[in-house]
Image: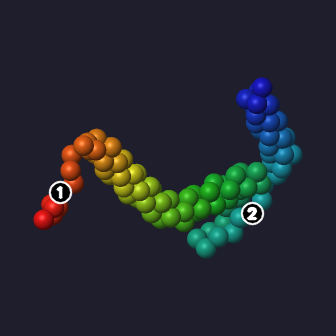
């Protein structure tokens, strides 16, 4: 049921975006450092959105990489502790502990 609602929401958003794009098809002049570009308004909006997403991903890439490395390190520590715990559980309780005996 949730998948159907999500699919309907995505279809609704795509239809809304197509409608907005259709009604904003008039060309606008985009002035930038190297020249002038005449492009439909919806094309300019989509390009700016794509550039923003790429810049956000680049900005977050360092933090994401650091967190992945920390997760890998912590998983290795968990594996080491599980091995140590398994070894401790396998020790026989009847075996005397090593150390100084009675004198």
The residue lying at 64 percent from left, 61 percent from top is: 52
The residue most toward the bottom is 33
Decide: is 63 above or below 87: below
Mark 1 Cα within 10 Å, few/some/many (few <14, many 20+)? few
Front-most of residues 58 and 80: 80
Residue 29 disc label: 2
- Which quarter of the image is occupied by the C terminus? bottom left
Q: Which sits earlier in the primary sequence, circle 2 or circle 1?
A: 2
Q: Are marks 2 and 1 in contact (CB under 8 Å)?
A: no
Residue 66 disc label: none
The residue most toward the left is 103
Cα separation between marks 2 and 1: 84 Å
The residue lying at 78 percent from left, 59 percent from top is: 28
Q: Position of residue 40 (x, y in %)?
A: 75, 52
The residue lying at 80 percent from left, 31 percent from top is: 5
Q: Position of residue 4 (x, y in %)?
A: 77, 27
The residue at which mark 1 appears reads as 98
Q: Position of residue 2 (x, y in %)?
A: 76, 30
Q: Is residue 40 left or right of residue 52?
A: right
Front-most of residues 69 and 51: 69
């Amino acid at each position: 049921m949730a998948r159907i609602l999500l699919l309907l929401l995505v279809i609704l958003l795509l239809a809304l975006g197509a409608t907005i794009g259709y009604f904003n098809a008039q060309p606008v002049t985009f002035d930038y450092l190297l020249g002038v570009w005449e492009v439909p308004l919806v094309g300019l909006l989509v390009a700016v959105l794509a550039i923003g997403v790429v810049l956000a991903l680049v900005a977050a890439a360092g933090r994401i990489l650091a967190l992945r490395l920390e997760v890998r390190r912590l998983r290795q520590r968990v594996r080491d502790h599980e091995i140590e715990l398994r070894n401790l559980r396998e020790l026989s309780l009847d075996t005397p502990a090593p150390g100084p005996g009675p004198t």
